[in-house]
């Protein structure tokens, strides 16, 4: 029998001084049985870094043709496609063709570096693609904050991110490997 998703209730307060965005989002997030705490927290971090009133979590891991997070226009056009992990070159190409802007948040230390070395030359033609790396140290600290019911406070200033749950704090420094034009 297949395992069911675990439901997480998240109150996500975002204070993004770089974009002047200050809002609290109440999210119900389904964690796929194969998803780790680390990936779940990276997903929440990616949501916070791109927070907007039209930003939505998708079915993610359970659907191949959808990103983890997206933002659609009022006319249902894909404005932003946010993917996590190390997508194949084919998925990157298809994503860039479907959406106005694509952001990939990769993580996993040496594995992420090897993926980027393999794929980076084929991404130069995509002006709408941004690739951001999260260090293994940062994402493992994030994973320690995960719980089924969370009140996350995420503060963003000068590209630095502070994530706190109760008295526990993790600091994340996203590193841009490719910028969108």
Image (spheres, rainbow, N blue to C red):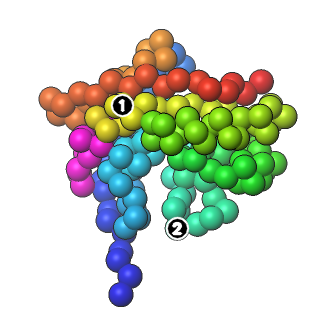
- Name the residue at 39% across, 50% down: 40
Circle 1 crowding by C-alpha within 10 Å: few under 14, some 14–19, many from 20: some
Above or below residue 62? Residue 136 is above
Identity of the residue drawn at 35% across and 75% down: 4
Q: Secondary structure at mark 1?
A: helix
Q: Nearer the viewer, mark 2 or mark 1?
A: 1
- At a point 49% along the width and 17% down the height, the residue shown is 159
Q: Quadrant of the N terminus?
A: bottom left
Q: Position of residue 149 (x, y in %)?
A: 23, 51
Residue 44 among magenta residues: no
Label 2 element class = helix
Q: Is residue 151 magenta?
A: yes
- In this orientation, does residue 78 appear? no
Q: Residue at label 2?
A: 62
Q: Position of residue 70 (x, y in %)?
A: 61, 48
Q: Which residues are magenta?
A: 142-153
Q: Quadrant of residue 115?
A: top right
Q: Residue furthest top?
A: 158
Which residue does the numbered mark 1 point to in the structure image?
A: 138
Which one is earlier in the sequence, the residue at label 2 or at label 1? Answer: 2
**Residue 172 appears in view:** yes
Instruction: Rate crowding at label 2 as few (under 14), some (14 to 19) or many (20 or more) other CA atoms within 10 Å.
Output: few
């Amino acid at each position: 029998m297949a395992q069911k998703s675990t439901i997480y209730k998240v109150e996500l307060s975002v204070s993004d001084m770089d974009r002047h965005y200050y809002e609290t989002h109440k999210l119900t997030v389904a964690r796929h049985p194969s998803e780790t705490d680390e990936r779940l927290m990276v997903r929440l971090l990616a949501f916070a870094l791109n927070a907007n009133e039209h930003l939505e979590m998708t079915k993610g891991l359970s659907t191949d043709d959808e990103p983890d997070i997206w933002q659609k226009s009022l006319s249902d056009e894909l404005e932003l496609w946010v993917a996590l992990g190390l997508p194949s070159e084919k998925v990157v190409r298809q994503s860039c063709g479907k959406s106005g802007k694509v952001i990939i948040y990769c993580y996993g230390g040496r594995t992420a570096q090897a993926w980027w070395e393999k794929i980076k030359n084929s991404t130069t033609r995509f002006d709408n693609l941004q690739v951001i790396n999260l260090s293994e140290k940062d994402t493992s600290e994030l994973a320690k904050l995960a719980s089924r019911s969370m009140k996350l406070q995420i503060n963003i200033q000068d590209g630095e991110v502070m994530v706190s749950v109760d008295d526990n704090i993790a600091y994340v420094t996203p590193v841009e490997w490719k910028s969108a034009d």
